[in-house]
Image (cartoon, coloured by chain):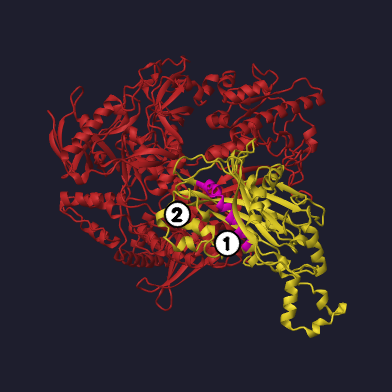
Amino acid sequence: MTSLKRSHASTTPTTTLSSKTYLRTLKSGKVQKIVRELYLRQDIPCSSQLCTACLDLAPAGFHRKTEPFVLSATPSGTKEYPEGHYLVPDTNAFLSAMDLFESEGGVFQDVIVLQTVLEEVKNRSLPLYNRLIALTKNEGKRFYVFFNDFRLETYVQREAGETINDRNDRAVRKGCAWYAEHLQQAVKARKSARCPAVVMLSDDKDCLRKAKKEGIKSSNLQDYVSGLPDADRLLDMVASAREQRVTKESKAELLYPDYLSISAMLTGVKNATLHQGIFNVSPYNYLEGTVNVPSFDRALIIQGRESSNRAVSGDVVVIEILPTDQWKAPSSKVIEEEDVGKNENAENEDDAPEGIVSEQERRALQEEVRKTHGRSTEGQSQPTAKVVGIIKRNWRQYVGHIDKDSVRSRAKESRAQQTVFLIPMDKRVPKIRVRTRQAGDLLGKRVLVSIDSWDRESRYPVGHFIRSLGELETKGAETEALLLEWDVQYRPFPKTVLDCLPAEGHDWKVPASLEDPGWQGRRDLRDLLVCSIDPPGCVDIDDALHAKQLPNGNFEVGVHIADVSHFVKPNNAMDKEASLRGTTVYLVDKRIDMLPMLLGTDLCSLKPYVERYAFSVIWEVNANADIVSSTFTKSVIRSREAFSYEAAQLRIDDRSQQDDLTNGMRQLMMLSKKLRAKRMAAGALNLASPEVRVEAESETSDPVDVKTKALLDTNQLVEEFMLLANISVAGKIYDAFPQTALLRRHAAPPKTNFEELSNQLKVKSGLELRTDSSKALADSLDICTDPNEPFFNTLIRILATRCMMSAEYFCSGTQAYPEFRHYGLASEIYTHFTSPIRRYADLEAHRQLAAAIDYETLDASLQSRSKLEAVCKNINVRHRNAQMAGRASVEYYVGQALKGRVLEEDGFVMKIFSNGFVVFVPRFGIEGLIRLRDMAGDGEREPDSLFDAENYFLEIKGEKVQRKVELFQKVKVKISDEAEESTGKRKIKLQLV
Amino acid sequence: MAPYTNIPLSPAELSYLHTSLSQQPPLRPDGRSPTQFRPLIAETDILPSANGSARICFADGTEAIVGVKAEVEKSRLAHTVPSNGEAAGQGVLGLGKGSARDVGDEMDVEGDESGGKGRDAWLEVAIEIPGMRDDDALPVFLSAMLTEALLADGGLKDRLWINSRFHWRLYIDILLHSQALSYPLPLLSLTTHLALLSTRLPALVSEKDEDPLFNDDWEASTYLYPPTTTTQHQKPPVTLLVMSVGATILFDPSKQELAVADSVLAISAAQSSTGELRMVALRTIDPPSRLTAAGVPNVLNTTTGATGAQTLSAADVLAMREKDQGQSVWRPPRGGVPRALVAKMIKMVVERGGVGEEVMEGLANVET
């Protein structure tokens, strides 16, 4: 009998077949034994320019060219390795010090990234993996990925009883050893004297010891970086190594409870004894967080540091509900970290063991409890919970500034390493403890840091410094800060993306010959009187309109959208970049495009007087604005004029203009009003958000004034037809692709969201807010008026908007049809189609519509539900971030516009706390917190107050100030700006007049 | 047992074989001693992605492959099991009432304590024989016998317990790789035994009643029957075919020998943790010899010149044949097995240094 087994086990130096066996636990709980066969090769090059042997060996690529070799023949040397060196970092080196490898300036070049390491990095952290991949593509850095697990000589088989980490460490050492020997031979062949060293970088003591024993040159990060020029700056980027902390662990007290094991958490969540959700910290009280879990309607409250147990806002956590006697009402007090934890010392090493709850915090909590108990309204106390484990950290890079008080020696020349606190811009993120040698330099600057770890014995997370963005309050630093904070891709488009643009560049034209393939399936609509209406100064014109009366008395109305999908083909580099960016971000003085300028502002943009490709939706509607028929087609149009809203309005209102174009616009206006009336009757909501526009001086783009946006009829004209087009397209693509249409939905908000607002209205104004349907809500919002205060209605609308869910993109197969509903627009089905230049969702909708009308075939990526879901998930996040970044930008500019000025303005009380209240100033669209403490003069005590949570008022009984502040009350506030003492940061300050 | 009845032996040949096997010591056609096994070739771990596997080739060319696969399954809590219907319908496999398994099942339902932590349903045996449907009598009967032995051991199903909420479900897939030339039970049983010996279950890292999590290292997985250097550990059962001819007891009967067996017993023995063998199941098997055609005595045979055949009545012919009792010509064996003989057979299997131990030792030495 011949054996049926493949002889994997007997891998000898010459057999090239091997296998590895491991177990994989599936989500369903099934366990699979996986056997992978490996075919080992001997032709994977070392990619060192020193080596000639590999040059002959290296397999040719697709174009019959071998990849050029990456590693320099003369790598730079250090004191320790005078003949130059190649670096071979292990996984943890990359995980803990990616910033270090990214640093410019001739260090960290000629790096060999072993496949073992790359894969481990991928498994541990996807963002870091992507950064590493970007590094390997950066030619100047000379990073080379060596596929050691596929090369016969460097392949390492897992030994019995060996952990996978040990195996990987061994693979790294083997890779180093092979490289060292290989280079030696290469150098000998060249008869040159200089042989670069191969240096393994690792922080693993055990691995270093073994490397030493095996004669492999190795170093830990700390030591290696110390030997480099500019070591001080670089050392800051090394995440404080675990070893350093280990020494003091013995005496350090464990402040936080330990997390449960993964399996215990999963079991708990499955059994519904524990709950999983995203940890959100309240923007007003950094000690209070909420977690929304699927099992309950209302969010669970997490109070205090111990309960939140090292969770940082945004983390996916597992929580356990606390016993009823620990339930509390949500805090009615503003607590900001800067106030409470002001006098802490970052260098706590010599101090007595720190408590999680500092004395001041404890006092703040006590007060809290007293108040909750004093109220004796049992209905008010809400379930609280504590964090027992963390499923996924969502740590990112944080922008902040160094806490001045935590810096010991300010002298710039002092190079002593000290630990300082970094106060993140995002108030919901705790202070981060950072070790740095450049504290003096960094004071007063915006800096970028990342969190490395948060151990049980440390009250605050430990992070490391990445780079400085520049002086606080300079425009460059602040803009970059907010882009980083909202994760907006703002780097210029890479070359691969620009390569996807049409070769003709700005000279591209719609082909003159109708025989050209570009004309295939396109209707010639050049004779239609099309025009576009946009905000003034708009260069990326997405949409244009036309209307004309038909002989039968009906109207033909057309919406023409820039045909971006003609230029951006699925799955090329440009498409990938656009899908990553998701949306164009509009800042006050800057626009961060989703697509390269050439497309967005020229080739796609429906500029006037030139021919452009478009995607047209054409309806026949009757005089009552009911749709008789609709057609969708790719087309070529020539816009007759690009109006601004104001200009269009003037032209329509000017009776003397009787040309066809103007009459068409009047017809559009008439139809849009009817459409709007119908929509309102169906229960569409008229919502409001505080929108202001910053007027900037054109030259310096310094803000000179702030204005609230004016709404004209023409705004609504455009809006109505865009909505109509979106709804029509949504219906069409859903018909064609019931499982994979990309749609947009707006879920009805749960009743509980409105509870507070409706109670406030009842108590303060005797008004009733009905929320059973969007129609009821729209009607009841209409009657929420105060005859004496025209703004009151808007204020209520702003507050109501905040109670809503946010609209989201989704893939039609993931929801049932009734769930498609767009609550705010009162439409059964909706998508985004009309702004493909600035939104990726619209581009996808274009592709789907093109396939639905048989213009082209649908790309596979648009047929796969899972891929579409991933796209939706990303663009939902990007969309929200873009909004936030835009708002933050306006906020910053409003602040700048008000700089040095003192104004008095009307404001409205929006929210009341027991020790302060929030005032909204409509003129500038700003919201500011006025604390009781601020009312007292210097050195005075906070005035006494009486807070009535049920009737929403706060009576201030200070020595100087005696007044009652009510919710929705109109107050006069003094607006000034103030430099904060602790940080040197400028802030808008509101004061009650 | 249809395929084994068409034995190409004449009554005279059968009679000759019977006589030579009845000698003391018996003369087996292939010259083996009564307890000697035919040589076999075995290897384990031949299926890389199974939890355990083995392959055995007998010298007569029959060959079997067994794969063992384990899957995590959620246990139904005891109180949710309907009191009767579920367990009774579960897999008695048509063996009829009164078998050991039926009793076991009922005990499981009534009190979990008595039956250990494991449950019978966690083990599933499937047999594939070329040219037969899986619901044909032979595969069903064979799998019932193998299952019976595996379960009667008790230890196996208890090993499948992970925690009070989860257990392993063990699928034993047996493939007879060749034509079924002789009765394949011993081949299948030995292969199953070998596969179970090589079976490993992923190592558990979670604790108590949590959802199980396992070590991703296959090397860290634990053997279902952990091997030790001494022989003193539990082993899965083997089922041996033992036949008797007269007073002779023969092990590992060949196809020809089975054709003249007076009785055939399938004895399953498992090794307990003390290293002792213990019989866990016993079944008598209807020997194919029963279906052979009887020889015609000379007095009745017209071709030998006998004339009586025409004159004698049917009753006389019958009486004559009975009187001959197989002395002069072949007569298919009848009746049961004497108790003493059964006892002797069992003893030969399970005693120290007996055949069972010899077989197990032989299989334990198979290199993986």
Q: Which residues are magenta?
A: B141-161
Q: Position of residue A978 (x, y in %)?
A: 29, 29
Residue at 42% x, 15% y is: A411
Q: Which residue is mark 1?
A: A858
Does residue A706 appear left or right of residue A176 in this picture?
left
From the rendered image, report the letter of the chain displayed in yellow.
B
The chain holding disc 1 is A
Residue A194: which quarter of the image?
top right
| Residue A617 in view | yes
Q: Nearer the viewer, residue B186 or A869?
A: B186
Element at badge 2? loop
Element at badge 1? loop
Give the colour of chain A. Answer: red
The chain holding disc 2 is B
Instruction: Tell me the chief SS of the magenta region.
Output: helix
Does residue A892 appear left or right of residue A577 in this picture?
left
Q: Amino acid at mark 2?
A: Arg
Q: Position of residue A293 (x, y in %)?
A: 36, 48
